[in-house]
Image (cartoon, rainbow, N blue to C red):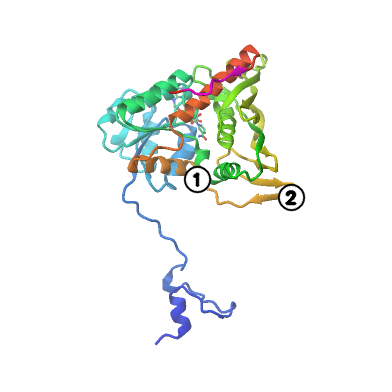
Amino acid sequence: MPTRRSFLAAAGLTAAGARAADPPLAPPDRQPPDLVLPDVPARQAKWAVVGLGKLAIEEIMPAFGRARLAKPTALVSGHPDKARRVAAAYGIDPRHIYSYDTFDRMRDDADIDVVYVVLPNSMHAEYTVRALRAGKHVLCEKPMATTVAECRDMIAAGREAGRKLMIAYRLRYEPFNQTVIRLCREKAVGELRTFEASNNQVTPAPNIRLSRALGGGPVQDVGIYCINAARYVTGQEPAEVTAFEHRPRDIARFREVPASVAFQLRFASGVLAHCDCSFDAAESRRYRVHGTDGFLDLDPAFSYRGLRLTVAKPSGREQVSLTEVNHFAAEMDHFSDCVLNGHDPRTPGEEGLADMRVIAAIEEAARTNRAVPLPPADPA
Ligand code: NAD
């Protein structure tokens, strides 16, 4: 007969009043009592990753290991040796490796549900439309495309094919930015008045981000995070845009895109946003939302890891404790759930189109040195 204490210990329990200095030492049942086993989802969506560059290799492929509902089953690359090596590393059958020429054959591949477009911006529209026409659902990296017209074509292609289109706004799937949105909706710092954001980095050549033909530019690459955040924090669309850009003629890597852009967004509610982005300033990725009763500060706000949220009120400042998640796994799980269970994604093509309208207005404002109005409604 086991004693009462050993019975409880075997069940992973501690008896009330047990002396803290007398816990069981060897793990009962030869395993940690708080071990959480992974659940086994009934189904997982099967993903093809298109474009095996820095983001795909360094962040997206490893993130499949953290995803519950997404698994990599196919690759598309113009470099066969690289694709074979990545396939081997992730247990992908090499028969599911495609090139840009054989891309459309994915139509006949039942081992692909979702195509994740991780190509230079100038190629997003073409490969998204081709994947939708091949009957696949598409997650497309930001920025959605290079023009408003391309965004509209992509949305139309999804509708015609009866397939889902989501834009990879990873920050909408992680708890820090989600908490800021909730606090703003709950008016935790009162009525919103102003918003400021910076997304700066040093981008040496060569890089797709410095090529106009590939859809590069600081607004398209990093400024878009400030635009998207201004829109999701306020829950509104900007009514008017002003912008300045700096194009240093003496720095060769900025012969096609500006080095820095500063822009302002005026919202009809009276909220004013001022933002800056640069390819020639040390890394800084943050925003602050100012309300009538305090402010919310997220610094860093746009990075993959290590986000920090501070709530400031007249009575003092507090840092919020949240458990961070892998942004890419979270967004891939969300889209997999949409595809497997017939839901609409939180960041559909219309979100990418809304940002692209603002990007086009920023470019026009910088070029003409005038404020550019944005009409309130823009049906896709
Ligand atoms: P990258 O230059 O490292 O990779 C681009 C990939 O496209 C490479 O595999 C390259 O071989 C391929 N490619 C095919 N045709 C090409 C061509 N004509 N010229 C150049 N490359 C060609 O870029 P990246 O940093 O991986 O960015 C890819 C996309 O992901 C971009 O749209 C970028 O905006 C987006 N991105 C998003 C995030 C995020 O946090 N969501 C982060 C980084 C990049």
From this view, report whether residue 99 is shown above or below residue 111: above
Confirm whether the magenta stretch covers residue 192: no
Residue 271 lies, with reference to residue 185, above or below; the image says above
Image-based side of 317 in relation to 125, left or right: right
Q: Which image quarter: residue 52?
A: top left
Quadrant that contains the N terminus: bottom left
Q: Position of residue 379 (x, y in %)?
A: 44, 23
Q: Residue furthest bottom?
A: 1
Q: Residue at x 40, y 24 (%)?
A: 154
Horizontal and vertical percent for residue 375? Answer: 54, 20
Residue placed furthest toward the left: 108
Disc 1 residue crowd, few under 14, some 14–19, many 20+, Cα 10 Å: some
Mark 2 = which residue? 316
Name the magenta segment's main secondary structure.
loop
Query: Which residue position is annotated with label 1?
Result: 326
Amino acid type at mark 1: Asn
- Circle 2 packing at 10 Å, graded few (<14), some (14-19), many (20+), is few
Q: From the image, which quarter does the C terminus lie in? A: top left
Quick one: SS at disc 1?
A: loop
Find residue 79 and report its image quarter. Answer: top left
Q: Amino acid at mark 2?
A: Gly
Direction from residue 275 to residue 114 in the image, left or right: left
Camera-side residue of 4 and 315: 315
Occupied quadrant, residue 20: bottom right
Q: Say if disc 1 is inside 8 Å of ligand 1.
A: no
Q: Which mark is residue 212?
A: none
* Secondary structure at numbered mark 2: strand
Q: Position of residue 338 (x, y in %)?
A: 37, 40
What stretch of residues is rendered in magenta? Answer: 372-378
